[in-house]
Image: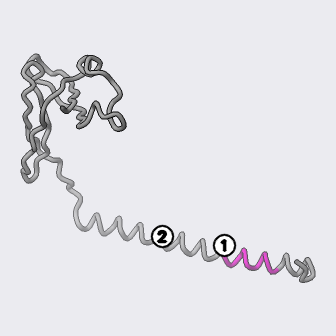
Amino acid sequence: MKYVEFITESSLRAKVVFIHSVPFDPINGLQKSEKELLETGVLVEEIPAASYQPGKDALLYIDPTTKKLWYEYVDILVDTTTDDELKTVVEQQKAALTDAHDAIAYQGEEILLLKQEVEALKGGQS
């Protein structure tokens, strides 16, 4: 049995928001009784597989009264970023990384100089 939680949209339609494949497993289960689970969702034998549809996202729905599950396919938002915009972002990130690397290298040199000064002040003693 699989546990399915949903948000009711109408008496015949609800959007599935949570699925647990082994709700009664002593280790990985939800640690709730069947009665407790049925207060917030339903138990079903299986979840159908979504089919791949290019450019679409599969949203799982359930009829709460019959426990029938189905998918509805919605368009995936397409990123409209152009290649030129991506190149600009990459160049900006490269420049920021180069600046950070230079700052780290400079600080490393400063640390070495300070260590040398400390050793000189100590008179070469450790």
Residue 28 lies left or right of residue 60; in this view the side is right
Q: Is residue 42 above or below residue 88?
A: above
Amino acid on which the number 1 mark rests in the picture: Gln
The circle on residue 120 is none
**What are the residue bounds of the magenta stretch?**
108-116
Q: Which quadrant does the N terminus fall into?
A: top left
- SS under mark 2: helix
* Residue drawn at x 13%, y 37% as measured from the top left: 47
Q: Label 2 to label 1, Cα distance in Å?
A: 15 Å
- SS under mark 1: helix
Q: Which quadrant does the C terminus fall into?
A: bottom right
Q: What secondary structure characterizes most of the magenta part?
A: helix
* Residue drawn at x 28%, y 64% as measured from the top left: 85
Q: Is residue 83 above or below residue 63?
A: below
Amino acid on which the number 2 mark rests in the picture: Leu
The circle on residue 107 is 1
Task: Give the residue at mark 2.
Answer: 97
